[in-house]
Amino acid sequence: MKWIITPRSVTVLKYLQIQIGKFLNQQIKYYFSLSYYHPMISEQQFQNELNIIIQNGMREDIGTGDYSSLACIPSDAKGKAKLLVKDKGIIAGVEFAKQVLENVDPTLQLDIFILDGETVKPGDVVFQVSGSSHSILRAERLLLNSMQRMSAIATKTNQYVKLLEGTNTQILDTRKTTPGFRACEKWAVKIGGGVNHRFALYDMIMLKDNHNDFAGGISKAITKTKDYLKENQLNLKIIVEARNLAEIKEILQNEGVDRILIDNFNFEDTKAAVALIGEKCQTESSGNINEQTIRQYAECGVNFISSGALTHSIYNMDLSLKAF
């Protein structure tokens, strides 16, 4: 068989190449969007947290019944709805929305067009869902509330990640999350390109100023902590907070510290702290670090910068679920 290459066939081949590239890119993003579990706790434990969020959200919203839908829509009615973007940023919560819909009604059909972690703009349709009208309406509020907040967190995290490009510093979240919604908010940080800090009080030791003061000092706090971990056969990393360079020096006199939290230091003292610590342990800056200062703190040489603002100072992305 003889193949004849025409200008039209070249155009078609280029089009196919672009479409295949887009498909492969989507599959890669989809794979990584599934890797949502926190590194300090197991995948199953993280999934349990998500299940609790869904169950509690549905209990809170539906209660004894969705009487608005029951009153005016036939029980066997079928419908379709699309998730419409009205803002720009990074979409997050698509996979969580899938879990919400499956929990409400496993027979619902979900067609996803945009994956977690992709950039969106007003007018984009992330997915469409079809099936029982009652089921779609029952899932609507939990689905939207979650995705709006997760997308805002992913967007802000991604902004911080871009500000750190070219440095060796990674952005961390904190425990300053919405009560009862922590798993989703930490998932959103990962979708935005950030790194999860400890999930809770039980998966990492963090000796902050109050711990150290109540324990009688930094060295006593560290010694007691190491003894406690050994006695209880717990394998947890230890982070210790320092308020000044003198405390940095004291921490370094103790063995077994994995990271020093350089809290509320200025730029010059942060550089001095990093120089003192060297390769002895990891370094983390925190305390009122914002978009204007984050780059300069990273250039001081710290391994991590933690920011509560990723989860507590955001404005929800504008999304809506529209019937069609």
Image (tube, rainbow, N blue to C red):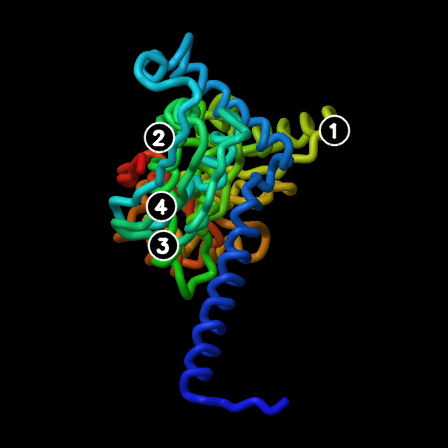
Residue that badge 2 annotates: 145
Q: Amino acid at mark 3?
A: Thr
Of the image marks 1 and 2, the number of the one nearer the N terminus = 2
Q: Earlier in the sequence, mark 1 or mark 4?
A: 1
Q: Residue at x 40, y 24 (%)?
A: 77
Residue kind at label 2, given as amino acid type: Asn
Answer above or below: position of 215 versus 235: above
- Compare marks 1 and 3 and give the one earlier in the sequence: 3
- The N terminus lies in quadrant: bottom right
Where residue 314 appears, as percent x and y from the top left, is: 29, 38
Q: What SS does tag 4 mark?
A: loop
Q: Which mark is residue 168?
A: none
- Give the Cα distance between marks 2 and 4: 36 Å
Whole-angstrom CA distance, mark 1 to mark 2, is 41 Å
Q: Which residue is mark 1?
A: 233
The disc at residue 119 is 3
User: Viewer-nearest of labels 1 and 3?
Assistant: 3
Residue annotated with mark 4: 265
Q: Name which residue type carries label 1.
A: Gln
Label 2 crowd (10 A; few <14 / some 14-19 / many >=20): some
Q: Residues within 10 Å of mark 4 (few under 14, many from 20)?
A: some
Q: Disc 4 marks which amino acid?
A: Phe
Q: CA distance from mark 1 to mark 3?
A: 45 Å
